[in-house]
Image: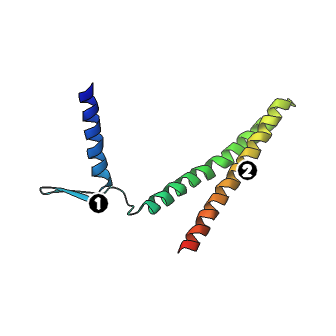
């Protein structure tokens, strides 16, 4: 059991060194950094951008699901309430998403 742990730790360490280093040279083989980011800031900005694009794609879908629930409720109060909650939470999520991007842009502007 200890041997497996040692192999996993060594393998993980080698992979981390391989992927997070600027470049290794093994004889004539050069393995470069596969990431296009040179700083942690660039990585964080890219992660925030990806998450915001996903959030902006999901928000209209959630609004459509809420509208569908309201339209197919046939007067049932629980389905109407569920549809309204979908729409409300999607709007709140979009507002938070836009506010977060604005705050990041503002702080970035202040620091540069």
Residue matched to label 2: 91
- The crowd level at tag 2 (other Cα within 10 Å; few <14, some 14-19, many 20+) is some
Residue 100 x, y percent position in the rendering: 63, 58
| Near-viewer residue (4 or 18) | 4
Marks 1 and 2, Cα distance to the nearest angstrom? 42 Å
Which image quadrant: the N terminus?
top left
Residue 31 x, y percent position in the rendering: 23, 55
| Image: 85 above or below 19 | above
Residue matched to label 1: 22
Please tell me how many numbered marks the rendered image carries. 2
Secondary structure of the residue carrying numbered label 1: loop
- For the point 25% across and 34% down, the residue is 6
Disc nearer the start of the sequence (1/2): 1
Residue 11 in the figure: left or right of residue 28: right
View extreme (left): residue? 27
- For the point 59% across and 68% down, the residue is 107
View extreme (bottom): residue? 112
View extreme (top): residue? 1
Q: Which mark is residue 4?
A: none
| Near-viewer residue (36 or 99) | 99
> Quadrant location of residue 32?
bottom left
| Near-viewer residue (23 or 94) | 23
| Image: 51 above or below 76 | below
Residue 82 x, y percent position in the rendering: 77, 35
Residue 102 x, y percent position in the rendering: 64, 64
Residue 97 in the figure: left or right of residue 26: right
- For the point 86% across and 31% down, the residue is 77
| Image: 28 above or below 5 | below
Q: Nearer the viewer, mark 1 or mark 2?
A: 1
- For the point 23% across and 29% down, the residue is 3
């Amino acid at each position: 059991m200890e041997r497996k742990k040692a192999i996993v730790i060594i393998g993980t360490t080698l992979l981390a060194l391989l992927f997070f280093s600027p470049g290794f040279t093994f004889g004539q083989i050069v393995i470069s950094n596969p990431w296009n980011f040179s700083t942690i800031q660039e990585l964080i900005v890219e992660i925030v951008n990806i998450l915001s694009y996903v959030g902006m794609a999901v928000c209209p879908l959630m609004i459509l699901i809420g509208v569908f629930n309201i339209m197919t409720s046939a007067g049932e109060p629980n389905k109407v309430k569920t549809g309204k909650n979908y729409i409300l939470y999607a709007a709140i999520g979009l507002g938070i998403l836009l506010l977060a991007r604005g705050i990041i842009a503002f702080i970035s502007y202040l620091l540069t």
